Image (cartoon, rainbow, N blue to C red):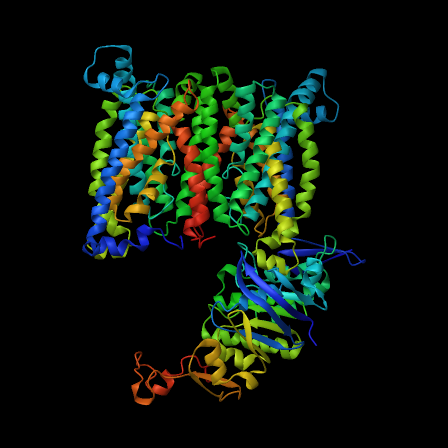
Amino acid sequence: MSRLSAESVTLAYDGRVIAEDLSVAVPDNSFTVIVGPNACGKSTLLRALSRMLKPRAGSVLLDGAAIGSYPARKVARTLGLLPQSSVAPDGITVADLVARGRHPHQGLLRQWSPEDERIVQESMAATGVAALADRYVDELSGGQRQRVWIAMALAQRTPLLLLDEPTTFLDIQHQIEILDLCAELHENQGRTLVAVLHDLNHAARYATHLIAMRDGRVVAEGAPGDIVTAELVERVFGLRCQVIDDPQTGTPLVVPAARRVSTGVRVSTGVTGSSAAAARPAGPPSA
Amino acid sequence: MLVDTSPQTSNAPRTAAAPEAVPRGRGARRLAGLVVSTGVLLLVVVASLAVGAKQIPVDQVWHGLFHYTGADADVVVRDVRVPRTALGLLVGAGLGLAGTVMQALTRNPLADPGLFGINAGAAAAVVSGVSFLGVTSLTGYVWFAFLGAAAVSVVVYALGGSRGATPVRLALAGTAVTAALNGYVYAVQLMDTAALDRMRFWTVGSLASANATVVRQVAPFVVAGIVLALLLARPLNAMALGDDQARALGTRLTATRVLALLTVTLLCGAATAACGPVVFVGLMVPHVVRSFTGPDLRWVLPYAAVLAPVLLLGSDIAGRILTRPSELQVGIVTALIGGPVFIHLVRRRRMAQL
Amino acid sequence: MNTTDSRPAVRALRTRGGLSIRFAPRAVLVAALLLAAALAASVALIGTGDYPMTFADVLRTLTGGGTEAQEFIVHDLRLPRVLVGLLVGTALGLAGAVFQSVSRNPLGSPDVIGLGQGSSVGALTVIVLFHGDPAAVAAGAVAGGLLSGAAIYALAWQRGVHGYRFVLVGIAMSAVLVAVIGYLLTKANLTDAARATVWMVGSLNGRDWSQVWPLLGVCAVLVPAVLGHGRSLRMLEMGDDSAYALGVPVERTRLVTTGAAVLLTAVATAAAGPISFVALAAPQLARRLTRSPGPNLTAAASTGAALLVGADWAAQRLFGADQLPVGALTGMLGGCYLLWLLHTERRAGRV
């Protein structure tokens, strides 16, 4: 079953076609992650799914009808999006920003119900920013700010939530923090999440459904454990690698092939020391 | 900051730090181009002498210049057209070089003396002089214009800041200064109708009132400015790479900045005093020049000195022809050409700061 | 009806039927105080002039209890001037707030981007080329403002607004328009030139009921229309994608509000000339006074009204009746304010 799907869409920016005849279905109650090399069309696909980009051909369906046929506000009550770039207005506090997520549920004479208030509090609590409620968004660190934006998207209370590279520009510990948060939202609140991620190992660890794209086409799709193989990684990213089990979770872990096996690895940082550690730069932290 | 940085910053390392690496053929081509440009300038000068409310054939122009007999045409050529053309040459070269130096100094491809409020500073100072001190002669105008230009260039540069100055910041600081000063100019003109009458022709930017005295008064300043600008080519080339890099290459930053501001003030002050504020010449010429010389200021500056007068005199001639028998002031023609060029530049560039 | 306290800065007013209104007490208080200030300045302004009147006299006359002379002075001479001032200030403050919000830049206001210059070109064309009467001049100003607004919109919008591009295109437009103004001034005879210069400074001198009615009509339609879009505008400040994701019809909001703002500016300019910097300064002042983010439309509008009437009153008191047009004062003050804004924003590292 799938509430959100793209049916053979052609996606283009100003005449530059990114993807043609692309079909994707987002399984309900999944944490779907889209991966692929730069410019493979993964963000474009997410923009189309969230109706930011109108497909040139084909259609994006939400609950069986073209997404463009619903009023903007109605879609906003079903489907939330965390865009890559958002601007925090000058001098806005965390609580105010999160409260703006309630916009699709409000009206001129129904501006701030007790329910709004409760949901905003809950969203802030869920993302761990409740203590920051009265701080200005400008003063927060990158990781805190991203959590505030996620809180805003949560306050929208949509069964479907789309996230466009939510971990970009964050430190590694904040990346994991955000992804853990997404996994919680998916498991505890039963929401359907769709995220574009850069890091294949993050995707393999957190996704319940993985979509691998290249050149505007879906190369493989399914549970990470079923589809992430050395052969797939080479086909999608052009990277020779070995796939092993993640010692923490048992999900697939992609280890890029060393330039020279065993003794040949030159350790330039001198910090890690062992060649095995240096050859595994993209692995998740072990704790 | 601009993402697709202008050629002066992206290509500068190659040409500025290692000029020997430039292929020999390019140098020859640049030299040839400069010769051709000078030829074009000569043609425009001749046209400027010949075209106007009264058309004078080229042989008559020659006659007027070298075999002066006092005939009507000779008088027009000697007393009207020659000073006008000479002033056009001086003002054009001055504005073109001032724009080039400003763009290099601020690393800002949108720099223009007019947009940055320097002309407005000169105008406000001149208005004060005319209205409060009863200045009527151009000799007086010049000093006031210098004062105003200098004050504004310091203020705008300080506000735009050398550190973290973005094209947008400087343009906005210029707009703010211009707006404040225009309010003042209007207020003075309102209180003093005589000043309005004298000023309303001056504030448009026109070469029409040129005479030999004006040319003689302005020439020393412009010439001094031109020499200074050409001398600054090398240190400004180094500064195009960034302050730290320039310092590493042995450039004295403060001295260069002060001299560059002095140059801009001399050139803009003199040009503005002589013919009123003319916008966009300083903006357009360096862009055109850079498109075929590359970013090396040692070439850009001489080219600008030759081609800016071509643009100014060309605009002046166009102004004389378009609405004959009356004239369209040169400042209006350059604004009408320059506005669209500026908008094109803004639209073409992707601003990271948007 | 009961009020609940969510956090100190924001309160909500709720009815039993499930209706609720959210407000920041400080913003409401500030708007009320500004409105009071604007009204007080209005009464003071009515009392100022060659025939001074006390506060009490003015109030008595306004409520129909003055002498015949007072009646004439207040109703026929000074009241229309004050009403024009209030309406123009409101319109400019509101239009400025919309522009700054849509371009996401405090400098994207109508006076920086050349709308005033566009209106000036329209008005000067009528004055200089057709020697038109004041009504024709006003029509010319409206036409000029609308045309330049449309031109800037068309030139600056490439797949969405980009604040700085919008501002820079506007600056170029205004440079071109200034050249055209200069040309028209040189074409004029001295009388027309003086009339044009007076018009271009922006003034409330000698405004009568014929200026009030059209202005009032336009404001009555457009001010509520813009205020109604306030919530959507607030969402727009977070970026097109975020606003869209929250269900805001982005393009429609932008088109409707900027269209209304251009019209408000043009009509205000037609009534009083291009009074500079009210549109720039009012929203900024309002934001600092209310200390709340977002366009603050109501506060900006009341700040505009208070600012303009207050400036006119100050100009009259400081320089004598009808000596210095209010536009010259706001221009100089506004320019300095703009420089200060740039200075502080540089320190904050924003621009």
Q: Nearer the viewer, residue A33 or C308?
A: A33
Up/down of B350 relative to B134, above or below: below
**Above or below — where is A148 with respect to C263?**
below
Compared with B78, A251 (above or below) is: below
**Which residue is depicted at the point 20% across and 37% down?**
B227
Left-right relation of C138 to A170: right
Q: Quadrant of residue C336?
A: top left
Residue under the image location 42 percent in, 22 percent down = B200
Q: Residue at x 43, y 50 (%)?
A: B349
Q: Where in the figure is residue C96, as x and y percent of width and height? A: 57, 41
The x, y position of residue A78, in whole percent, is 69, 66
Residue A268 appears in the picture as rendered:
yes
In the image, taking residue B106 as reference, residue A111 lies left or right, namely: right
As drawn, B87 above or below A157:
above
Q: Position of residue B13 (x, y in %)?
A: 26, 56
Residue at (56% x, 59% y) in the render: A93
Query: Residue C39 location, x and y as percent?
Result: 65, 34
- In this image, C147 relative to C174: left or right? right
Residue B205: tell me if it is visible.
no
